[in-house]
Image (spheres, rainbow, N blue to C red):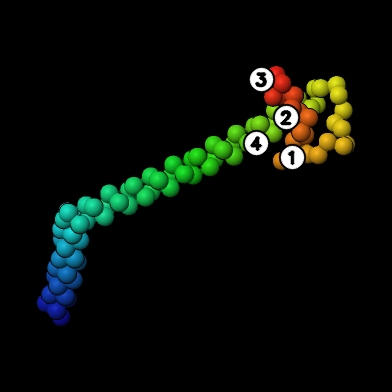
Amino acid sequence: MKRIFWFSLGAAAGVAMSRKATETARQASPAGIASNVGDAFRELAGAVGSFGADVRAGMSEREQELNDIVHERSAAPARADVPAVDGRHAASRRARRAEG
């Protein structure tokens, strides 16, 4: 019974090591390296895109905060007849153009 156990354990270890060696050899081949580099570039592109989206969202949020502060501190009340564009009044956009 001991011999069957050790033989089975050796066979299982041999199969596991053989699979590991085959996978390592595949990754070391030119096709495997190209695959790994391609995956790395796709991951990097996704991270850069996500970072850009986060930056744009933060910029938009901060711009809205600054516009709210300007509206709070200005003495002129918001006019009802001026349509809002993207949550901002067209009058404030004209004022910014005149300043710039």
User: Which label lies toward us, 4 or 3?
Assistant: 3
The residue beneath circle 4 is 61
> Of circles 4 and 1, which is in front?
1
Q: Earlier in the sequence, mark 2 or mark 4?
A: 4
Q: Reading the chain from its start, which is encountered first: label 4 or label 1?
A: 4
Residue occupying the point 15% across, 65% down: 18
Kindly identify the amino acid type of the residue bearing the numbered disc 1.
Val
| Residue that label 2 marks | 93
Of marks 2 and 4, the one in the foreground:
2
Q: Earlier in the sequence, mark 4 or mark 3?
A: 4
State if disc 1 and disc 2 touch (CB < 8 Å): yes
Query: For the residue carrying disc 2, how many other residues have a C-alpha within 10 Å: few (<14), some (14-19), or many (20+)?
Result: few
Whole-angstrom CA distance, mark 2 to mark 1, is 9 Å
- Which SS class for mark 3? loop
Kindly state the secondary structure of the residue where label 4 is placed. helix
Rendered image: mark on residue 85: 1
- Judge by depth and name the residue closer to the eye, 86 or 37: 86
